[in-house]
Amino acid sequence: MIITLNMKITFFSSKPYDKEFFNKANQQFNFELDYFETHLGPHVLNLIENTDAICAFVNDKLDAEVLEHLAKKGVKYIALRCAGFNNVDLEAAKRLGLKVSRVPAYSPEAVAEHAMAMILTLNRKTHKAYNRVREQNFALNGLMGFNLYQKTIGVIGTGNIGAAFAKIAKGFGARVLAYDITENQELKDLGIEYVSQEQLLSESDIVSLHCPLMDSTRHLINADSIKKMKKNVMLINTSRGGLIDTKAVIDGLKSKHIGYLGIDVYEQEEKLFFRDLSHTIIEDDTIQRLMSFPNVLVTAHQAFFTQEALDQIANSTLTSLSHFEKNEEFENPNAVLV
Ligand code: NAD
């Protein structure tokens, strides 16, 4: 008698909502799912036993040391339940024969809509209005915003999310400028103008970042690029924290060159985000400084967090693992990193 065992997948950084959506999606696959709340990193390698696949998230650390250990323990597949993959040493994975997948496009609108929500909150100060009115303060002083209509909005990176964001911005009647290393004809047909990065920075009232974090894009926003921006610019980052040199941005806020900052991602977020730290002393003075500005809005990497996105993430991640196991071709080749 041949006994076939179902693939075992060990999850790291898992939250109750991951369990809910993955357990639901797994009804089609019947894999064995094992959930750990802790981050994946060198400190938890002893937790990995008899597992075929690791399912990891944005702040799990998959460097060469971790990957070597996983390969030694018999792990065959790494499935990232996110789009970005800057936290994985792909060269090491290749060398070790590990297959790596990601979720290349899950509801890009989820992130694009959150970027616009950040813009509207910073601009129209609905977060302040909400608290004021609850305290029976109906005064408008300090709540004045500006029309997005006919303002210039610059989009850096027009892939899945940047394109969805550019269309939303266009819907507000804004002039939309774009910069990417490849141009999207559909956006051009909609009247979105591709320009150089310099022109985008110098003409935009709002700059929204949607390119991936790579060596070439790390600290794309730094003291020099801030100097090129318009005075009082609004800067939005829902992509990856490392795109911004946080210290330079703090200087830009202090000098009032940057008028508004909305960030859903932060360079040192792995020590903070996705946890309730309300009873602890935060040692990171940089985030504390950022949060002390009245014109800064920080959300904790929640741009992806919609029901539609979580459904797609869970289905796509388990489908990729099933394709790896059955040696099947992927419908979207961008889901395979190695
Ligand atoms: P994508 O691969 O579809 O698009 C990325 C685009 O950036 C591509 O068009 C690419 O050509 C462009 N690009 C690459 N290098 C560039 C450069 N130097 N300058 C300008 N453009 C450049 O990716 P996506 O699905 O649109 O996601 C974008 C990023 O958003 C991801 O890398 C990820 O880091 C981030 N993200 C964040 C969240 C969140 O919850 N905050 C969720 C999903 C994705």
Image (cartoon, helix red, strand yellow):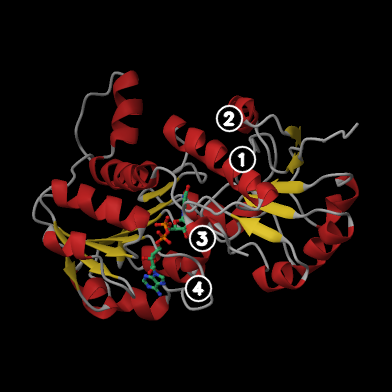
Is 20 on the left or on the right of 4, as rendered?
left
Contact check, label 1 and label 2, Cβ < 8 Å: yes
* Disc sitting over residue 241 in the figure: 3
What residue did someone put label 1 on? 318
Instruction: Give the Cα separation between the discs numbered 3 and 4.
Output: 9 Å
Q: Nearer the viewer, residue 327 or 112?
A: 327
Q: Nearer the viewer, mark 3 or mark 2?
A: 2
Q: Please name the residue shown 46% across and 54% down the image.
A: 332
Instruction: Give the Cα separation between the discs numbered 4 and 1.
Output: 31 Å
- Mark 4 or 2, nearer chain start: 2
- Mark 4 or 1, nearer chain start: 4
Amino acid type, callout 4: Arg
- Mark 1 or 2, nearer chain start: 2
What residue did someone put label 4 on? 218
Q: Nearer the viewer, mark 3 or mark 1?
A: 1
Q: Quadrant of residue 125?
A: top left
Contact check, label 3 and label 4, Cβ < 8 Å: no
Q: Please name the residue shown 38% across and 68% down the image.
A: 252
What residue did someone put label 2 on? 25
Q: Is residue 50 visible?
A: yes
* Disc sitting over residue 310 in the figure: none
